[in-house]
Image (cartoon, rainbow, N blue to C red):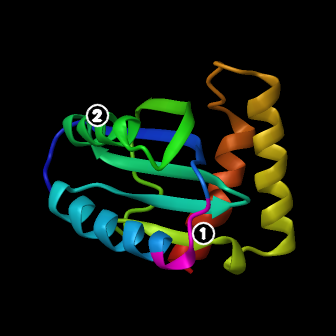
Amino acid sequence: MPSGALHRTVYMSTAVGVLRAEELDRIYLRSKSANSREGITGLMLFYEGVFLQVLEGPVAGVTSLMEKIRRDRRHANLVVLESGAVQARNFHQSPMHFIAARNLSAGEKQAFSDLRQEVAARPGALLAGPGLSDFLAVFAAAKTA
């Protein structure tokens, strides 16, 4: 993987229209391949028409990828929850770990809904902190277990 300063960006966005399972699988496979080439790891969750994505890697790669994501017409209302330098990756073992709604537990679905409500209550505010970190830690632990 490319060396350099390690950066993490976490964002939420709303899907435009209905994304079928086949389209989500296609997005995942393309993301996984492209991220692997760029040294980017992360997580993509999709539940009730909302994406939450974590991107970790070299600052230039993450920044470039975020520019592409912002132009992607399959989603709107992109809100950055966290963005900055980090000491270590949470999702170091996968170029893109994808979890669809059908694979979320009832507790994970509730936590996702709670996070969405927090984002809606604080538009434009970065949410970096214990709540977001705890939410993401559940998925990082599950991925490495």
Quadrant including the C terminus: bottom right
Write down the region rendered in magenta.
Answer: 18-22
Q: Is residue 14 above or below residue 32?
A: above
- Please say whether residue 132 is one of the residues in the magenta stretch: no
Q: Is residue 45 above or below residue 24?
A: above
Q: Position of residue 144 (x, y in %)?
A: 51, 75
Which residue occupies 78% across, 65% down?
A: 108
Which residue occupies 56% across, 65% down?
A: 19
- The answer to whether one can see residue 93 in this image is no
Under mark 1, the amino acid is Ala
Residue at the spot of label 1: 141
Q: State which mark lies toward you, 2 or 1.
A: 2
Q: Position of residue 124 (x, y in %)?
A: 64, 18
Return the mark for residue 63: 2
- Please say whether residue 19 is one of the residues in the magenta stretch: yes
Q: Is residue 43 above or below residue 4?
A: below
Total tally of numbered discs in the picture: 2
Q: Is residue 83 left or right of residue 30?
A: right
Local SS, label 2: helix
Q: Position of residue 12 (x, y in %)?
A: 59, 42
Under mark 2, the amino acid is Thr
The secondary structure that most of the magenta stretch takes on is loop
